[in-house]
Amino acid sequence: MKVNYYDAFVPSMILGKNFSNSLKQTSFTLSKFPIAKKNNFNKKSFVKKKTLTLMKENSSSTEEYMTILNEEFVSHEKNFKSKFQSLSPSYRKLISLLIFSTSLVSGWYFAPSRKPLLCAGFSLVSGGAGWFLLKKYNVKNEFEIKKQIIQNIDLNSENTNLKNELIKIQKENGLTEIQLKSEIFDVYKKFLEIVLRNSTSNLEEIQNLKKFIKVLNLSPQEIGQCHYDFAQNLYKKYIVMLEREGVSEPNEIINKFFFLSDRIFSLDSSKGYQYESARIRKIFLFSEENVKKNCFEKSTGLYKNFVLESLKDPSIKSENLSEIGELLSLPNSSRNEIHGEFYEQKIDEILSSQQKIKENEKKNLENLENLLEISKELSENYLAKKTEPIFSSELISIFESLKNEINENELDIFLNSIKTKKKDLLLSNESLEKSVSLSLNKVLCEQIENSLKFLRGNKKIESVKETEKILNLRNNFSKIEKKILENGNFSEIFSNLGKNFKIEEIKKVYTAYLNECLIEKKISSKNEKNLRELEQLFGIATKESNEIYKTSVGPLLENEIKKVLEKKNFNDENKKKIDEIVLSLKIEDNLSLEVKSSIYKETLKNLLSKESFPTQKEQDELETFRKFLSLRWDDVQNFHDSLSELSYQKSLTEALGATGIIPKNYWEGLENLRKKLRMSEQKAKQIFYAAIKDKLRIGFEKAISENKKKAQLQSSESGDSGEDPTVTKGAGTALGIEAGNPSGNELVNLVDLYSKNSIFVENENVFNETNQISLLGQTGRAEIKNSTKSKIDYSFPVNLDGLFNKKITTDMYREYLVECFSVKSQIEKRKLFNNLDKLGPILGLTASEIETIHSSVGSVVYKQYLSQALNKGFLDKSEMAFLSNIQNTLSMSSSKCSEFIREAKKNKVSILIESIFSTSKVNADRVSDMRKIAKQLGVDLINDLEISSDQRSRMFRVEIDNGIEKGKITKESQELIGEIQSGFGLADNESKKILLQCISSRCESHLVNAVASLRKKSDENVIQELEKMLSFGNLLPIQIKKSIGSQKEREDLFSIYQTNFNENLSQDQYDEKTKLLKLMLGIN
């Protein structure tokens, strides 16, 4: 609840920082500053305690300001302090010495004790007190100094002696320069205080403040500090009235203070202006936006008052307006806006009394233009803004009269009225053209709206009359438009008026007028011209108007033709009558053809809607009617094709039956039916292909269903038996891929359906072939013969493309291809392969898709067959022929097949090598077989298989070891070594090293075994081991190291060999062996 203090004084209690913080949190704006009832502006200023309301009555003239300022420093109280201060400086010094001396003596005299020290102490105390009082009262005569300063100020003169006078005042009063400046600041602040006693701002105050600053020679920084100090004091005085209501005086004074400060700060630089303005705003917590808004409003108000005064005072010139604008810092845009407002007010004053501008008033307007510095263009715009509505009103009245049919004299009267009004209102040609355009457009739009209103009420005759008024207005205005304005362009007004309305409504107006013109079933030249004008007025495109015309005249022609059709009287007289209607209505050939074709189509539809096919008589009548309408057969062929489609399709479906194959004797009947229905061959083929496509779809869906059943059956069987589900039981053909059920393959039926219905389109391609034939009896000679050959290519007009997912069709084709290779019966295999090249296109597969499937399936088949055929280590002619057959059948590339063969051979050898090293001991026979197979297949162990050197060396040693042991490699027969070396790709030095290691280790091994047998006294085993050792030593004689066996044991071994030698040996062979044995055993 708000408390009413009834004008009571409410003091403000300053409570330190807490109060200050709470105050800053209050939101202050210039427009919402608290209202106060009463307050003293400055205690020193308002000695008589004048209220703010009484202060408004003070004069604002320069002399009065200076008088009030002087009185403020004279009318203070005459107390001791002021009297003392009013004395001259010499008298004040003398009195000061007297008072000080008296205080010293009094202290000594009135001391409570006569002791010298105590008396001296009392004397010092009393003297100090006297000195303190003197210092307090012995201040410089402030009011006298300020009075002297004010008396030397004259705001109406240059004040050339003021500087000397100020120096004199400074010397007389013993002031420092800073003290003098302080006195000057107080004088300026007092002057500012007096100015603010009147809350209403005026230009003289701003000028006086600027003069005062100039006279006192105050710098921008000093002025800023003065205003800042003043603002702080002002804020303290007004803060106590935050709770008061009912008086707006403080708010107005503060607004005025900010305005005056803004004007004074504007004399400073931009940075100085911003700094000083921000400082005083911060004291009151005002926003920059609100302060600027207040200053702008006050500047605008003062400028408007000055402009208003200039209208009454002839002595004020445009230069004075510019000076005031600069003084108030009003931008040119704001000044121009104010000038425009006063100029428009003047025009309103002139036009309010009478609807025209006289010559003397025109002169006054020109004077006002010069005073306000309004350009010719702007003045015309202001004038047009006020006069155009008056002129437009007059024009609308004239245009309303032009809607009727009028004579030339009446047109001249209207024209003169327009010219007179233009002259009276001082309208420019541009304004005239603009007003005419807007007024004319308004009248036309209203007229169209009237026509639409009648149409909405289904009053077509009244609507047509309103439309005729539009045409009259257009015609009458065209006669005077060049006289109104010679270079005027009003064509745009009469083009595309329909943009202001919905296109459907505009078309209704146009259609209503057109139907009225067609009542007599002919179009006159006048009507045709009016229709063209309406098209232009309404903005209806030629294409749209033609459509409307067709919609209107088409039924007229159609009714006349139907009358003839009902009587079936197709004679020349009726035909001539129809042609005359076409000419009189100016019906174009395409529209005439469209109407006639529509009637023919309807007649044919009625004829074919019967249960039975048309009789010969009905066909003849229809043909006569077609000729009567002058319709070509090409014009009606599509009607026969579309309307007889169902009948032909029904018969075709019956002929196809359940099998989808048409018997031979049905083809002739279908052809006769086509001719009877007068259906084109192309349409008949289209229907036939559609029916076949549907049969193909049914057959393919059945094939998909059977394939799913077969897959489910195989899955259940593999699950029951626990066998590998990837291998079908009983599918053990040579290729090892799954066999299907060719006898029940529905895909074969699709090809049969295609071929038995003769759907294939055969295209014979003839080409030349060049052959080189050897001549008999002439070796190396041949002759070249050219021969012509032909090849039949098939095209497939019907396929399943688009009916099924591409993945389904490709998967089904792949299954069929696998079945071709997996079937066991040669008859079935041949049958499947014969249909292969036709099945892919029937399924809708492209050549690239078929090639991809062939490549993927062919690769599997090719690799499987190669894998089986290479088990014996080579490929014979029959196998190569079969592979070639696969390649040709599946159109596989030669390079790819060659790569398959190469990889299969490498894979075969690689598997053999893996099997060799899969056991802990390498088998020599398997190594030998592998080497021979690799040689037969042309597989290089290094380049093709990248077999490591260690593995090749190991296999080489094993095979060499076995060859020597079995006697395949001897001293006399060493060819096998080179063959084995070449097979494993070993270098000569490496081979020799391996051979030496092999012979050395085997000889040592056999010698160890022979010594062991000797110790066991087994002479037979001794002989066997020595023979084996000699077989290796014979190839490369070496002496076995002596660490194996003792010398005696070696001699015993030699003795046993001599005793038990082979009697089948010749003496030379015996001598050679014993010699070799001695060498190897180291026996001399």
Image: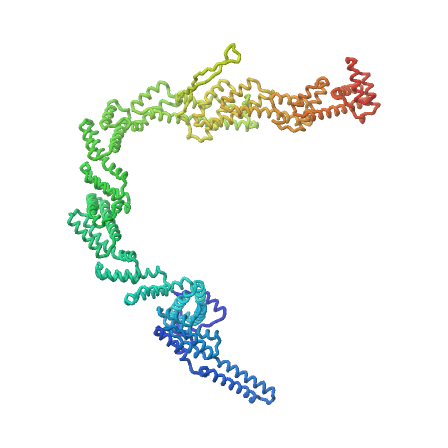
**Residue 848 position within the rendered picture, expressed as x and y whole percent measured from the top left:** 46, 28
Quadrant in the rendering for residue 149 = bottom left
Residue 324, above or below 551:
below
Can the viewer see residue 54 in this picture? Answer: no
Residue 335, above or below 179:
above
Quadrant location of the N terminus in the rendered image: bottom left
Which is nearer the eye, 848 or 687? 848
Can the viewer see residue 682 in this picture? Answer: yes
Left or right? Give the position of 313 relative to 1057: left
Which is nearer the eye, 618 or 482? 482
Left or right? Give the position of 877 relative to 7: right
Q: Residue furthest top?
A: 777
**Residue 885 position within the rendered picture, expressed as x and y whole percent measured from the top left:** 51, 20
Its colouring scheme is rainbow
**Residue 264 position within the rendered picture, expressed as x and y whole percent measured from the top left:** 40, 67
Residue 129, above or below 1067:
below
Q: Residue furthest right?
A: 1048
Quadrant in the rendering for residue 40 = bottom left
